[in-house]
Amino acid sequence: MLRIVDELAGRGPLRICAHVPPPGGPGGLTGLRVLLVADVLARVVELRGRHVLLGRTGPGVPSAAAVGIRPSDADGTPDHIADMLGGPPGVHLTNRAYEGGGGASLQVAEAHTSVSPAGLEESDPLAVRLLLLSHAHHEPTALRAEALDEARLTLARWRRAVADWGEQPSKPMPMDLLRPVRAGLEDGLATPAVLDLLRDLETDTDVPAGAKFETFAHLDRVLGLELARETGRPHPAGAPA
């Protein structure tokens, strides 16, 4: 299994190729999940200061932009991608064992849902991103309507909390809490541990509001959930102050 931290060192850009499988039926989210894991890997590497170039083989995934996945820098065959990116990918992401050779590989498990496409994008499509990030990328998962509703409520609550914390004086991030989850991200893209930290931090009365704001905003550079997008906006009418 690829240890992500091994791919963070090096010079020049890290080239990542996401191999999107054919659509797996109306409830298939595996292609989206492959692209999402590639997006998170890119964010982790860039957080360490290294440039990333993304390639994609296979079909496009229309819902990718809605869940915050950035566009690829090159699409097509592996040879075309290597030519366009200036070299062969150093990491390949697939939903099965990669047999192309060259570079490390990271296998992404299947994802499915019984929720309709319209239901997935209803209200806040980033709730789908949150749910997928709540599971280790190597474990199969199924998204359910009840969990999707809960994810939407969680995002709304966190965004309002981050906006409120942002009105308080800035404080240093609690590095004793942050350091282990950063290590987990760099060693294996452990996004569930990051979300667990945010849930604990939300209600931790020992951590100042300004430190909570900085931590949520910092980790959202990897999560991509737009947690700070309500900062500076007034409370909606009827919402608690």
Image (cartoon, rainbow, N blue to C red):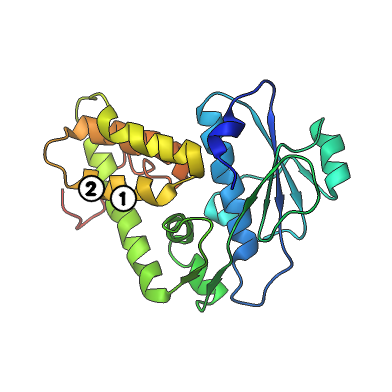
Identify the secondary structure beneath mark 2: helix
Query: Can you name the residue that lies furthest to the front here?
Result: 1
- Residue 139, x across and y down, in percent: 50, 62
Towards the viewer: 161 or 12: 12
Towards the viewer: 65 or 239: 65
Towards the viewer: 95 or 49: 95
For residue 74, side relative to residue 195 (left or right): right
- Is there CB contact under 8 Å for labels 2 and 1? yes
For residue 232, side relative to residue 205 (left or right): right
Query: Can you name the residue that lies furthest to the top here?
Result: 11
> Could you tell me if residue 234 is visible in this image?
no
Q: Which residue is mark 2?
A: 200
Residue occupying image coordinates x 20% and y 25%: 169
Residue occupying image coordinates x 51% and y 26%: 48
Task: Tell me the amino acid under the disc marked 1.
Answer: Asp
> Could you tell me if residue 40 is visible in this image?
yes
Circle number at residue 196: 1
Residue occupying image coordinates x 22% and y 37%: 165
- Residue 161, x across and y down, in percent: 24, 45
Q: Residues within 10 Å of mark 1 (few under 14, many from 20)?
A: few
- Residue 69, x across and y down, in percent: 59, 49
Is 114 rendered above or below residue 236? below
Tell me the quarter of the picture where residue 31 sits: bottom right
For residue 84, side relative to residue 5 (left or right): right
Task: Tell me the amino acid under the disc marked 2.
Answer: Asp
Identify the secondary structure beneath mark 1: helix
Measure the C-alpha gap from mark 2 to mark 1: 6 Å
Tell me the quarter of the picture where residue 220 sits: top left
Circle number at residue 105: none
- Residue 117, x across and y down, in percent: 56, 72
